[in-house]
Image: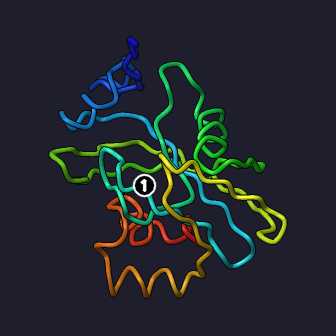
């Protein structure tokens, strides 16, 4: 079986986009596009524990979901696609803002991303969360205070980007 590499949008110095293979973007620390999704039920955020076998940050807690748009895929379509692929549900999403960060994510890989943030709401009692086990090991709903207490006590249990979001952009996390 011949699997084609996933091409994602990288950002050139002049701001233009060009296609690059996803693993190469991380191995070379290239500036590229990404999306992050945060689904809330009132004061609680749905977070996921990434599958241990993921190519980076496996077994760590992260926001509801995150990914990279495919080449020429609009950010909102990407966010909705990935929410369905990873967690098996869809909700209405609204774009919140765009942030940039850079972080070592282990295994010799580096994230340097311009991230479009999306927020959605759901009634967790009525929401059927069906994680894809190859992507997501576990999910849970967490309050703002509990999240910040857990990150302070055990930052190593959370992905680098989620810790950055909680520290630099708390208005996005809650």
In terms of secondary structure, where does tag 1 sit?
Answer: loop
The image quarter in which residue 57 lies: bottom left
Residue drawn at x 26%, y 37% as measured from the top left: 26
The image quarter in which residue 153 lies: bottom left
Camera-side residue of 134 and 84: 134
Residue drawn at x 58%, y 52% as measured from the top left: 37
In this figure, which residue is indicated by the disc labeled 1?
51
- Tell me if residue 153 comes above or below residue 79 in the rendering: below
Camera-side residue of 51 and 12: 51
Left or right of 133, for residue 161: left
Residue drawn at x 36%, y 62% as measured from the top left: 159
Most distant residue in the front direction: 1
- Tell me if residue 12 comes above or below residue 137 in the rendering: above
- Tell me if residue 17 comes above or below residue 151 in the rendering: above
Residue 47, position as x, y percentages in the image: 55, 66
Residue 64, position as x, y percentages in the image: 57, 58
Q: Residues within 10 Å of mark 1 (few under 14, many from 20)?
A: many
């Amino acid at each position: 079986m011949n699997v084609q590499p996933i091409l994602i949008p990288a950002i050139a110095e002049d701001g233009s986009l060009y296609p690059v293979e996803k693993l190469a973007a991380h191995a070379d620390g290239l500036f590229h596009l990404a999306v992050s999704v945060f689904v809330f039920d009132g004061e609680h955020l749905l977070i996921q524990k990434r599958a241990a076998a993921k190519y980076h940050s496996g077994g760590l807690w992260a926001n509801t979901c995150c990914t990279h748009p495919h080449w020429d895929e609009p950010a909102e379509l990407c966010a909705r696609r990935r929410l369905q692929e990873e967690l098996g549900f869809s909700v209405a999403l609204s774009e919140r803002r765009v942030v940039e960060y850079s972080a070592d994510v282990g295994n010799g890989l580096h994230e340097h991303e311009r991230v479009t943030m999306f927020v959605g709401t759901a009634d967790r009692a009525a929401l059927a969360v069906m994680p894809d086990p190859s992507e997501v090991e576990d999910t849970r709903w967490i309050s703002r205070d509990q999240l910040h207490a857990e990150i302070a006590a055990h930052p190593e249990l959370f992905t680098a980007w989620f810790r950055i979001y909680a520290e630099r952009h708390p208005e996005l996390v809650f």
